[in-house]
């Protein structure tokens, strides 16, 4: 039974998240429905990350086991045709044959996320639903300095959702950079894995640093508190993008 690696792009707005759920449409469910329409097979695909409702992806990865072999470009194009007919805001960017040892989730070495903030007085028109609108001016250099406190191996209890199901709050953040181009502020994060709501918690906390309400020591104190109540506000999902997975 051949296994295929699917690289997937999606707008998270219409979905309850990546994972199939009973309370609304999911990205996983939509891709599985496209596979069913194409092949007649009911399959369960595994994704590299379980993005929340409203979170976008430019490089989510999933794997699927199918009963017959497909040319890679044919599988990609056919799945996109079925997704298009269903009105989904999902695209299969690539389909590649992989061996049975490949697992989209457990084979991942690093995951890369982007959080986008548009900092300007005027509300969003083109970027509505695709970035966090902040009307106040933000100091991205202060945000970057504060972000470096969070790089490395730490107990991130402060920065994970109360309902996070991870066995341990300890994670190693390889990169957390904040840059600015015009009105757009980008927060880029890299790690082998992240906790539930970790990046959105980082973004909300770093916004406080950008507003001058917190400084580096405040962020360090929040981290060391190991208490969810010490976290800044959780940023909305609109600005978060699952960018890439390294294998």
Image: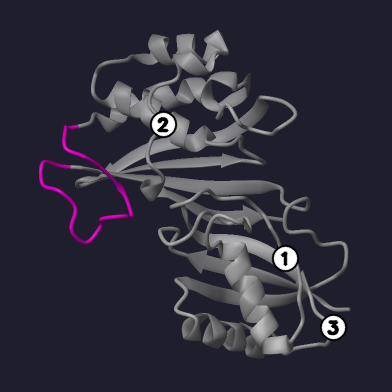
Q: Quarter-wise, where is residue 99 in the image?
A: bottom right
**Residue 186 on the magenta span:** no
Residue located beneath label 1 in the image: 45
Span of residues in magenta: 120-137
Q: State how far apart marks 1 and 3 are (Cα).
A: 14 Å
Q: Are marks 3 and 2 in contact (CB under 8 Å)?
A: no
Name the secondary structure under disc 3: loop
Residue located beneath label 2 in the image: 234
Q: Quarter-wise, where is residue 73 in the image?
A: bottom right
Q: 32 above or below 176?
A: below
Which disc is residue 67 wearing? 3
Q: Position of residue 70 (x, y in %)?
A: 75, 88
Q: Which residue appears at 51% of the width and 67% of the height? A: 9
Q: Which residue appears at 63% of the width and 20% of the height? A: 154
Q: Which residue appears at 62% of the width and 67% of the height? A: 29
**Residue 135 on the magenta span:** yes
Q: How many marks?
A: 3
Q: Position of residue 17 (x, y in %)?
A: 53, 54
Q: Nearer the viewer, residue 133 or 215?
A: 133
Point out the image quarter for the C terminus: bottom right
């Amino acid at each position: 039974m051949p296994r295929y690696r699917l690289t997937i792009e999606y707008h998270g707005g219409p979905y309850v998240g990546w994972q199939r759920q009973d309370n609304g449409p999911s990205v996983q469910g939509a891709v599985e429905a496209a596979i069913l329409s194409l092949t007649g097979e009911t399959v369960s695909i595994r994704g590299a990350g379980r993005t929340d409702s409203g979170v976008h992806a430019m490089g989510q990865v999933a794997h699927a086991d199918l009963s017959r072999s497909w040319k890679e470009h044919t599988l990609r194009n056919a799945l996109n045709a079925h997704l298009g007919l269903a009105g989904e805001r999902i695209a299969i960017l690539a389909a590649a044959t992989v061996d049975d040892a490949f697992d989209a989730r457990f084979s991942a070495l690093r995951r890369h996320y982007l959080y986008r903030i548009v900092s300007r007085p005027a509300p969003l028109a083109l970027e509505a639903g695709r970035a966090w609108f902040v009307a106040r001016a933000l100091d991205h250099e202060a945000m970057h300095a504060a972000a470096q406190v969070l790089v490395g191996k730490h107990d991130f209890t402060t920065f994970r959702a109360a309902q996070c199901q991870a066995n341990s709050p300890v994670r190693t953040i390889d990169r957390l950079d904040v840059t600015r181009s015009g009105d757009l502020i980008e927060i880029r994060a890299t790690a082998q894995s992240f906790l539930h709501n970790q990046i959105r918690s980082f973004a909300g906390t770093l916004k406080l640093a950008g507003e001058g309400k917190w400084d580096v020591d405040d962020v360090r104190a929040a981290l060391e508190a190991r208490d969810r109540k010490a976290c800044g506000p959780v940023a909305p999902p609109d600005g978060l993008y699952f960018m890439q997975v390294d294998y």
